[in-house]
Image (cartoon, rainbow, N blue to C red):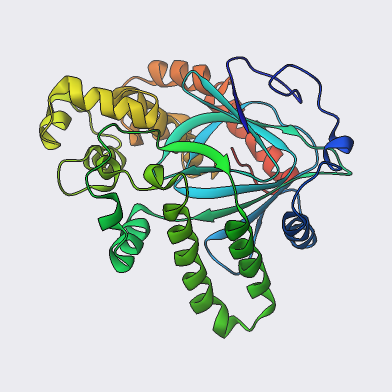
Amino acid sequence: MHRQQSEGNQCDATGKAINMRERGKEDIPPELVSLRLMAGKLAKAEGENKVHIPFLSIYKHSLPSALASGVITPSYCLILQGAKTVHLGKEILSYQAGDFLASVIDVPATGQITGAVPEAPYLGLKVDFTIEEITAVMLESGFNKHFGNRQAQPGPAAFVGKSNADIIEIMTRLLKLLDKPDSLVAYLANLLKKELIFTLLAGEHGHLFFQRTLMDQEGTGIGKAIGWIKDNLSTAFAIEDLADMCSMSVSSFHHKFKAATTMGPLQYQKHLRLQEARRLLLNGVMNAGAAALHVGYESPSQFNREYRRLFGRPPAQDAKVMRSQLDAAGSLSI
């Protein structure tokens, strides 16, 4: 896992081309190799493969992808094979087998798969969770006392890191549950999910998984403002009102919001609006004009302009292309 300041395609941080066949020969833990084999057998289709554990998905892509806009939802994503880059604001994060991408809130981003060939496809596991689930584990375990009030500065809400043996072992047990009777899967899977969250909190990135300013959706954290924006997507707002909601000065609120999401509140709302409009168009629920009004745009021309700027195509054309890609791959993911 490494950070870059320029975009690459199947290249490492130095710009050296990646040979995916050689990447498969890298010295990786045998536990990760075993987990990769298990996931590979379960990933029958290109794109997202759903299993009968609702919060777990397996991703498979046999070829590199183009840079695409999307939203990183609250989740833990572990790469088992291949490589990927995610653009968060001005920062470009590259990660590969054994690395993870995690987020504790919805974070608009762009990303692409940079390492994948048919003989060694990109493989990844994604576990979805919520802020409420993280908070519950903190309270049940008493782990919140460990953090106290030590974190003064907010960190990024989405970040990458290196998985350890404990995480790989939990993910392996999670996949092994798929061989058990359905009557046992739901209960045991939820226990493993709690164990995963606890292990992440106890690890070196624990301070990023539990950020009081993001978790507090009832008191004075910016999580309250983020939750309000998501619940009132079509409603215009003044930044001063959100700052008051969080009992912060405008400058402090804006600084903390941007530190977490890489963008200001108005830009954050715009990205979420456009992503929701894209979802409505893709599902055939509304046409472009209706989708624009639904997410809060009063001007169709402004909607079309901003949609094209973010996704690279006008709404109707983009929906058509996206549907054809879904038909080919079964699913799309950032």
| Residue found 60% across the figure and 52% down from its top | 164
Residue 209 in view:
yes
On screen, residue 30 versus residue 320, left or right, reads right
| Residue found 52% across the figure and 77% down from its top | 188
Foreground of the two, 295 or 181: 181
Which picture quadrant has residue 297?
top left
| x then y, percent, for residue 81 | 75, 45
Which picture quadrant has residue 85?
top right
| x then y, percent, for residue 89 | 46, 22
Q: Quadrant of the C terminus?
A: top right
On screen, residue 98 versus residue 196, left or right, reads right
Q: Quadrant of the N terminus?
A: top right
Foreground of the two, 146 or 101: 146
Foreground of the two, 81 or 107: 81
On screen, residue 199 versus residue 228, left or right, reads right
| x then y, percent, for residue 135 | 31, 57
| Residue found 76% across the figure and 26% down from its top | 10
Relative height, residue 56 to residue 244 (above, below): below
Relative height, residue 13 to residue 40 (above, below): above
Which picture quadrant has residue 237?
top left
| x then y, percent, for residue 262 | 40, 25
Residue 297 in view:
no
On screen, residue 229 versus residue 272, left or right, reads left
